[in-house]
Amino acid sequence: MSIIMNADIQKSLIEAINIVAGERLKNVNFTKSFTGIVREVNGLTCIVEILDSNTECIIPHNLSSFIGKDDIVIVQDIQNTNRQRIVQGVISSINKDMFHIYDTVTDTVVSSVEQLWDEDLQMVIDVVLEIGD
Amino acid sequence: MNDNIQSSLIEAMKILVDNAINNTHFTTSQVGLVKQVSGFDCTVELLGSDTECKILEHLQTKIRQGDIVIVQDLYNDNTTKYVQSKIGEAIP
């Protein structure tokens, strides 16, 4: 005996499979990535604007000196649960001028700074850097 | 249901599921060899082909030619790849 499926049944079967597969994929714990702009840094957490909404993200210890306001960062939702979003690093900044502190002894970039802060006065210091001969 | 229909159904399901997976934007990772570094960009050999990748600011001074690195494809679409970390150096 042979069965010939009609087009309607085929179509709804395909649709059903697509729905089931889509639902299953939503619950898979793959890592998901976003890029965003750092709006605010509070110690080891920061607020990153991702797809027009502000999200709180975790800054790993080894990156704490590299993340600043206006940096463009890669953020990963490591378990795809919308709970733990971790900053992976800086890829650029919306400020054109970036200033890096470079340690010539260890041959590494120690920090990137866009603004200097005076602890006593609790305010931003504006400085002009002149590079001489 | 006869065998033919069953196996074409399974075949159809595989195609649909593969398709759904290919259209998800999860992050995928690969290991590659750094061929060249220029500023915050570098060329990494991934599975035999050269790929342009971004270097994160804090890794810029650590990545050199000949390094073995983890590269992540942010959206699983081959458009945005960056060097996530350095895990070793190729023996010269």
Image (cartoon, coloured by chain):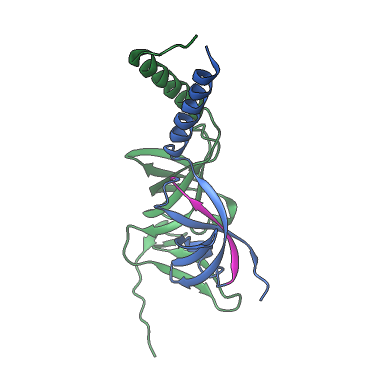
Q: Quadrant of the C terminus of chain A?
A: bottom left
Left/right of residue A107 with respect to residue A33 in the rendered view: right
Q: Main secondary structure of the magenta part?
A: strand
Q: Position of residue A95 (x, y in %)?
A: 32, 61
Q: Is residue A80 above or below residue B46?
A: above
Camera sees residue B41:
yes
Q: Nearer the viewer, residue A1 or A22?
A: A1
The colour applied to the residues of chain A in this rendering is: green
Chain displayed in blue: B
Q: Position of residue B76 (x, y in %)?
A: 45, 45
Q: Nearer the viewer, residue A88 or A13?
A: A13
Q: Residue at x 56, y 68 (%)?
A: B62
Q: Position of residue B29 (x, y in %)?
A: 54, 50
Q: Quadrant of residue A124?
A: bottom left
Q: Quadrant of residue A56?
A: top left
Q: Residue at x 46, y 27 (%)?
A: B12
Q: Residue at x 46, y 67 (%)?
A: B42
Magenta-drawn stretch contains B51: no
Q: Residue furthest bottom?
A: A133
Left/right of residue A30 with respect to residue A52 in the rendered view: right
Please provide the residue range marked out in magenta. Answer: B66-75
